[in-house]
Amino acid sequence: MKWKSYPYIIIVTVPEMIPVSIPGGERLPKKKLIFLGSTIIIVAIISIWIGSAINLPTPVAYKNYEGRVFYEIFVRAFKDSNGDGIGDLDGVTAQLDYLEDLGVRGLWLMPITKATSYHGYDTEDYYTIDEDYGTLEDLEVLVKEAHKRDIKVVMDLVINHTSTEHPYFKEARQDAKSPYRAYYIWNDDLSKEFERSPMSTLAWAVNEGQEELYYAMFDKSMPDLNYDNPQVEEEMQKVAKHYLDLGIDGFRLDAAKWIYNEKEKNIDFWNRFQSFVHEQNPEAILIGEVWDAPYNICEYAQVLDSFFDFNVGDSILNAMNNKTLSNVVYNYKTIEEMYKEEDASFVLAPFLTNHDQTRVMNILREDVAKMKVAATIYLSLPGTPFIYYGEEIGMTGTKPDEHIREPFIWSGKDLTQNTTWIDSTNKVEQVALDTQIEDSQSLYHHYKQVIGLRNTHKALSIGTVEEVKTPSQKVFAMERSYEEEQIYVLASISDVEETILLEEGTYKVLLDSQGPTHLTTGENSSNYTHQVTLKPGQIMILSKN
């Protein structure tokens, strides 16, 4: 009966006995391999014997896009597989075990097709993978391996504009009679050269050597495509089908708001595009970048499956810095309800920052405690949260954009494990994954714990959300519910102890940032009544008994 009396001691200490495999690390000695095998056998026997005594949870079986945690990857910066210092698709494949262990169940690959610039948002060839990243065959392998781990893969689709180096544009700018001339937008009124676009950028660029302009609202090196030409829309549908046939699960749609400068025409376009994509694969996902105030973009919820709401991330980070956490849930619910009024099946994609923004650690002044609270909040919200690569280890980065997209730091000891496409300005030894794995209180472990709970409890992944009143604006509290399960997420950035009154009853501790953490949901000895006192900086996730 000794094993049965102390099941959690066994389960919690076993991971400490299993050596963690660091990417690129040394092979385990033979003796350790034998010990590891023995440990696994012991755990299996114990699990079978005590299974009836403990109500172990079943991991959430995600049927579709909703509820999963996605991870945004800038491939160039992530992991190099061939020694040239540049991240590639094989490198991403090699680290799928890391991502799966972190709890990630979806990937967003930033542009991977052949492009002119390092970032890939100026496509030269939609049907070819950038030679730095590999081949179409490498992409197929990545997708297949990801699917084995129940990880969906979406890729950036940049169809608002091309590069000036795209063969279509090169021919069009040189030959006014080219069939590709109508793929772009031209104007011979040179007085428009300094006209502003709706984004307040210069809208037109001079076609050198010609008395004419072409429309390029993002940059003169990125001419906009002309979607008044039906052939352009047909071509982009072919591009989408090309990758859907390879197994890609959907697309993140860059600059989705700017296909046309008229909202109604834009909505009609994406409605047609969504219908086409869903005809190819009813489960495929379209995730839009429609960066604007919620009331300006809510109609896009009718024609896109999901999109990023920058206001959600801003509200969380402003709340952290202003110490006014009490309105976060209200703001989220208000925004989500606005979108769901357009389409009840719409899924919001919360995030903190992405590849176009100052990294979240800089915004929070490199305060790890604040970062843990911010991460806990958005990773516990409804919808499908997105992590920007390196966020989980506290990477920093400010403009220019290259330094928001620096190499992921796999190791602070063996720097050859990190890409070298650009020099890192990060505190390498501090943020390195191998350093954080060794520290049980690190940001990495906190991310893994919160995501693990989300992947274990339907209340946290696909449940409803309600605001819980708190005694102070410096305290965050929300309730997530699914069927009979009620889970409360609590966090304090107060300088003093704060007491929260929950519903009458007792509560089981699933996570305590200042005490023992239990990632399973079996019985444990740490129970609370409905009165919970949070210490300064404390984060707790509780399940109502």
Image (cartoon, rainbow, N blue to C red):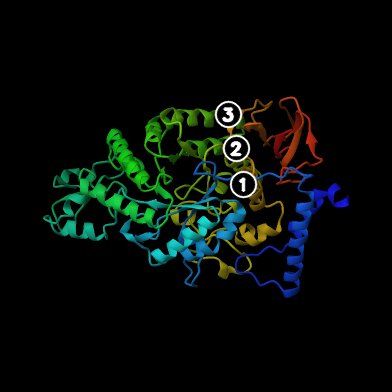
Task: Tell me which label, 3 or 2, sits earlier in the chain.
Answer: 2
Q: Nearer the viewer, residue 452 or 386?
A: 452
Task: Tell me which label, 1 or 2, sits earlier in the chain.
Answer: 2
- In contact (CB < 8 Å): disc 3 and disc 2: no
On residue 364, the disc is: none
The mark lying in front, picked from 1 and 2, is: 1
Circle 3: is it few (<14), some (14-19), or many (20+) Cα within 10 Å? some
Task: Tell me which label, 3 or 1, sits earlier in the chain.
Answer: 3
What's the amino acid at mark 1? Ile
Q: Could you tell me which residue is drawn at 42 percent across and 33 percent down?
A: 293
Q: Could you tell me which residue is drawn at 66 percent across and 32 percent down?
A: 486
- According to the picture, the residue beneath numbered tag 1 turns out to be 451
227 is higher (above) or lower (below) than 418: above
- In contact (CB < 8 Å): disc 3 and disc 1: no
What's the amino acid at mark 3? Asn
- According to the picture, the residue beneath numbered tag 3 turns out to be 327
Query: Is residue 225 rendered to the left or right of residue 67?
Result: left
Q: What secondary structure is marked by label 2?
A: helix
Whether residue 38 appears in this view of the structure is yes
Q: Position of residue 45 (x, y in %)?
A: 77, 57
The mark lying in front, picked from 3 and 1, is: 1
Q: What secondary structure is marked by label 3?
A: helix
Q: What secondary structure is marked by label 1?
A: helix
Q: Nearer the viewer, residue 270 or 493?
A: 270
140 is higher (above) or lower (below) than 337: below
- According to the picture, the residue beneath numbered tag 2 turns out to be 320
